[in-house]
Amino acid sequence: MKIDTVVLLLCLSVTRAQGDLTGGPENDTKNSLGEPQTGGCVSDGAILTELRALRDMVFDQRVQLSITQTQLQFYKDQLSVTQSHVEEMRRDNAVQAADLVTLKARLTASEGEVKDLHTENSALEARLRISERHVEELKAFDAALEARLSLSERHVQELKAENEGRPKVAFYTALTNSGSVGPFNTETPLVYSKVFTNIGNAYSPVTGVFTAPVRGVYYIRFTASDQRRSGNIGVHIYKNNLWIMGNYASNTDGQRKYVVNAVTLELEQGDMIMLRLPSGYGLYDAIDNYNTFSGFLLFPM
């Protein structure tokens, strides 16, 4: 609007100027010959040219204004879109802020759980250290036991090797199932005919004699019994023809009486051990084996 007003005013000014230049006597001048001459007037072509230039400038201004308005509208649209984006971002930020609060709460809870886990892990580590110490102690104890076991096994092997070369001698016998034996007028050898054990075959059930198969120390034991009233119970032990021991008892009530004893003897190979019934003494045996004769080798020499 301002440009149109300027153009209009300019046209009026030019028109007025043309009237002043052509119609006023005060503006008439004369040349050197004394002829009247028009001076300072503007031609119509120049005015038209100026007006066209102004029109073109106005048109350019209008085009520029249109472009500017279009750009302005574009910027307004962009601004609206930007404002929408800003609103969306604000809403997103509000959601993110709420999420952040939730995350902070979860983080706080997680930190508490982490602290609890650290405490629990510390307790577990302490228990683990104690367990490891116990394991080390058990390993040491096991190592000691293994050493003792190895030593014991070595001793067992040595004993086995030693026993494999040692003679094995043991016997256990009973007198008879026939009942009364004696009394006799003379000392009588006792033959224990019921043989239960005779390792090494050193006892003879025919003669009643035990013969030492190797030199060594032997353990010899006997039991003697009778149940007859007014009877005398007695047994003599002989080594070869050497009297070793005698044991005696009397029966006055008709109840069973026992005589029991044992000796440890050092015997040479071939030495003989026998039991004899003293003169006037008697024994009574049956299936219960009240009268026995037994022995075994303690160790060879």
Image: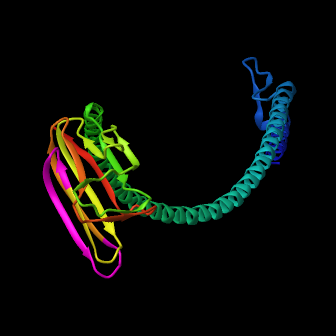
Q: Residue at x 40, y 56 (%)?
A: 176
Q: Residue 198 location, x and y as percent?
A: 36, 43
Quadrant assignment, res 63: top right
The residue furthest front is 185
Q: How many marks?
A: 0
Q: Residue 297 location, x and y as percent?
A: 24, 44
In this figure, which colouring scheme has been used for the structure?
Answer: rainbow
Q: Is residue 181 left or right of residue 95?
A: left
Residue 74 drawn above or below residue 288: above
Magenta range is 237-257
Q: Is residue 195 left or right of residue 107?
A: left
Q: Residue 38 location, x and y as percent?
A: 80, 27
Quadrant assignment, res 99: bottom right
Asked if residue 254 lies in the magenta stretch, the reply is yes
> Considering depth in this image, is 72 or 102 the residue closer to the camera?
102
- Main secondary structure along the magenta-highlighted residues: strand
The residue furthest top is 33
Q: Residue 48 location, x and y as percent?
A: 86, 29
Residue 140 drawn above or below residue 235: above
> Considering depth in this image, is 192 or 120 the residue closer to the camera?
192
> Considering depth in this image, is 244 or 48 the residue closer to the camera?
244
Q: Residue at x 26, y 41 (%)?
A: 147
Q: Residue at x 25, y 56 (%)?
A: 221
> Considering depth in this image, is 279 or 135 the residue closer to the camera?
279
Asked if residue 39 lies in the magenta stretch, the reply is no
Quarter of the image with the C terminus is: top left
